[in-house]
Amino acid sequence: MKICIWCTKIFDLGGTKRVVTLLANELVKEHDVTIMVYQDRFKEDRNMYHMSEDIKVDFIDNNEFVNRHHTPAFCWRYLVQKLNAKYGIFNKEKYNDILADAIFPKKTREKWVKYLNEQNYDIIITTASLSLRLGMLAPELNAKTIGWQHNCYAGYLDVPNVVFWKQECLLQEYLPKLDRYIVLSDYDKRDYKKFLDIDTEVKINPRSFVSERKCDPKSKRFLMATRFVYAKGLDLMMESFEEFCKQDDEWQLDIIGAGDLWNQIVADAKRRGIEDRVNFVGYTNEPEKYYLNSSVFLLPSRWEGWPMVIMEAFEFGLPVIAFHTGAMDLIIDDGKTGYLPEAFDTKKFTDAMLKLAHDEELRREMSRNAIWKSEDFAIEKAVKEWNRLFNRVMGIKTFYMKNEEQILECREKYPLRTSYAEFVKEYQIRDNTILYEAFGGRGMICNPYALFLYLLEKEEYQDYTHIWVLEDFEDNRKQIEKYEKYPNVRFVKYKSKEYCKELATVKYLVNNVSFPSYFLKREGQVLIDTWHGTPLKNMGFDIPGANISQGNTARNLLSADYIVSSGPYMTKTAYKDSYKMQNLYEGTVLEEGFPRNDKLFDSDRAEVIQELKDCGVDVKEDKKIILYAPTWRGEQYSRPDTDLQDVYKLINVMENSIDTNEYQIFVKLHQIVYHYMKENAMEPGDAQTKFIPATMDTNEILSVTDVLISDYSSIFYDFMLTGKPILFYVPDAENFEDYRGLYFGFDKLPGPAVSTPEKLGELLKDLPGVAASCKEKYEKAREQICPRDDGKACKRIAEVLLDGKEPVNPIYLNQTDKVKLLVYAGDFSDTQETKAFYEFLNKVDYEHFDVTLIGNGAKEEESSEKLDSLPKEIRVLYWKRSYPATDEEYVCHKKFMKSKKTEVPEMLLDFYRRELRRMIGMSKFDYALVFTDMKKFFPAMSGALDVKQIFNIKNWQNLLKC
């Protein structure tokens, strides 16, 4: 569309100019955009608000349209305006023609109509007072017309001699002639309807930028960014701050901005004796540094529309205190993202300042809320709404308009995956941003935490922003407090909309397990899977039912650019064999050792002991630590099969077997077990002080541990680096091995294994003898399992990940002579398709073909059994239908699937490409074989499946000749 935005000025200071430029910069990506201004062309400065070079600027010389000579007609119009402004004489319906001609003469209007129609615009948008003029022109214009207001109703109509002062009757006649009249809030919508009977539409102004850096909640500085004019209430600010200073000796106030009242306000501060506490900055090109150095934003305005400065403050994480005027309560959540004292009550304003100034934890909480609130004002959301408005105005019936009810139902049903898809489609990837997730947000732990600490401390990586995913902020409160002081460290709640945004837009993704099923690694993102342990017990596709249960983990691994391995044993056991990545994985296995094991070489014992105490663990500095760390057991990951009473009993037996003056015993449960037990079975009192929280990093604890007792947990592999004794307590060895299986036999363990508490107690009585008897096996196991761990794994991995250096020990698994084949056979409900598939299984040569099946149909028992009984040579990627589709795409997809159409709607092509990428990661195939109707394997219809040929149920036998 050809769009014109008509305003008085654009290359000047002010929120309206910024918002217009911001929106125009986005609209010009899809439309032909012109900004038309009354401004000398020699004032053009596109750098002021970073205006796109693609935007045309039409400089209008108003003298060509208006005769400014002092003719009798000119003098009459001037007199009408002055009399009306003072007395409202002509603010009556019967005088509308007179007042309209005084403001915008008829001959001038005719010139404007001719000029605008010659430009062939589709849509003309005006700002502020120009909306009334556009309304006068609208009936004669060929273009659709939109008035766009940037102040509240009161700011335009109740302020003497400003904008629409005493012009209500004109507004009632001419504003309805516009195709749309846009206001900032529901309050404005209400007031225009209530007082003028004018229908309006609400469009919220977007924030003007995004900042990865956030404010410092510890800072003792207030900030204002404003113009020095009466409306901004600077006199009220001086009164309030004077009272504040009487009750506080530390806090300072920075004021950015300039204006007519500068000298008056500076003099007022001096008269009140607070000039040494107020920093009058003036105009600055570097407002960011003031936002970053403050912790609370102040806005004492008498009236505001939709202040850009609030959105800027929220983006930096600043809570805002503002008088409760206009639409402030639609922007600021009182008590959550700031405070809204009663309008112009300076005492209550002071009280709010004191409350935030003297409660750092409250500032931190409000800062987190403000950061997420900022997302409501994202430019991507605003542009989508404006485009929908353009379509409605132009009479274009879009898919959204035709299916709005179903789309909104989908949005409500799948809020996370649809939000994630929106972020993937519409938001850019942000450089120098790293997201860390460990065990689904359980805490700042394991390999991601070790890598984070290394990067945070190194000078060369200070430009990176670190975002931690946490499931429970309260459980991780101490860690949050420890790192919130860093302006480049942030926290998001697991499986929140904020989490979806970060997951979709950060540059680097670090995980030790898997991201949710709707995740796909975007082109341009870098994913490193650090994993969480060298395998002892069976994992991946070696577990019963894995062809269904391991689909998401396999997908994540195949999507990773890098996978961390402790050494050749782990690479072969876990990745090549267990997860069947041999031949298919296109990334790089980094055999550099585990980052978390660096801590075993450099942790400070006193700091770790203090951290244990801070977590409520009753630890004594002068005693050695025996750590019992059992693994997870059970058939369902979220419901572990562990009896806590057995653990209490074991503790008692162990304590009766040791010298408690020399040793103390603590328990570190598996992440999932601890979480479950805390929710369901943990006993209060002294016993609880022996359990180390899941939120504390295991390898920090191992660094102060003197004796480790474990079972099938791979934790002992890490602990071998210390050379200290390891005991194995395995009461269910036979049952566990039958159910889950083990890679590392008991005869190879670097310590004795016993099955009863009593036998364990006997071992504890002779720890030196135990260590001596297992020395040879200990050393052999250490050489086999962790040959790369030398305390420098973080350094090597960081250099590969962020500096682009070649890995020291890279392993590539995609080198093969086999023909790589992607197969889809549906859910086995169609007899003919299933028969053909099994015929293919009987004839395929696995020495020649590497076969990957996209699995489906686990909800049906028969289909599930078929999936489980497939030949072990086949790699199954189970297709969980957690589509990363927007709400519109999802509804369109359902309609397409129900239709008889075979050509993919254009709206779905990008979704189908994303879904294919989600399913197979970075994997590459030579051929594809689809036994079903192609629509059932719709991602392949996107054209993104890069294979030599797609075979089907009719010609699949020809494939075997390839």
Image (cartoon, rainbow, N blue to C red):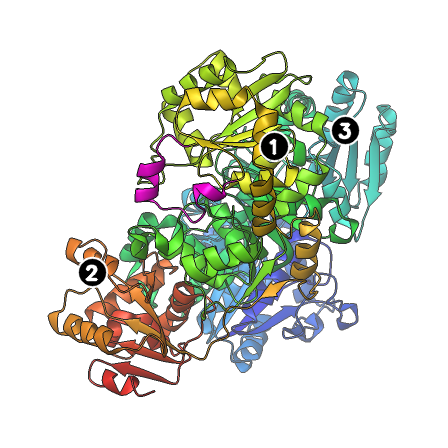
Q: Secondary structure at mark 2?
A: helix
Magenta region includes residue 406: no
Q: Amino acid at mark 2?
A: Lys
Q: Nearer the viewer, residue 89 or 715?
A: 715
When the figure is inspected, residue 484 is found, relative to residue 921, above or below; the finding is: above
Q: Earlier in the sequence, mark 1 or mark 2?
A: 1
Q: Amino acid at mark 3?
A: Met
Q: CA distance from mark 3 to mark 2?
A: 76 Å
Q: Which mark is residue 238?
A: 3
Q: Which residue is mark 2?
A: 866
Instruction: Identify the residue under disc 1.
Output: 772
Relative to 634, residue 431 above or below? below
Q: Secondary structure at mark 1?
A: helix
User: Taking the image as drawn, is residue 322 in sight?
Assistant: no
Q: Which residues are magenta?
A: 730-749
Q: Nearer the viewer, mark 1 or mark 2?
A: 1
- Distance CA(mark 3)–CA(mark 1): 76 Å
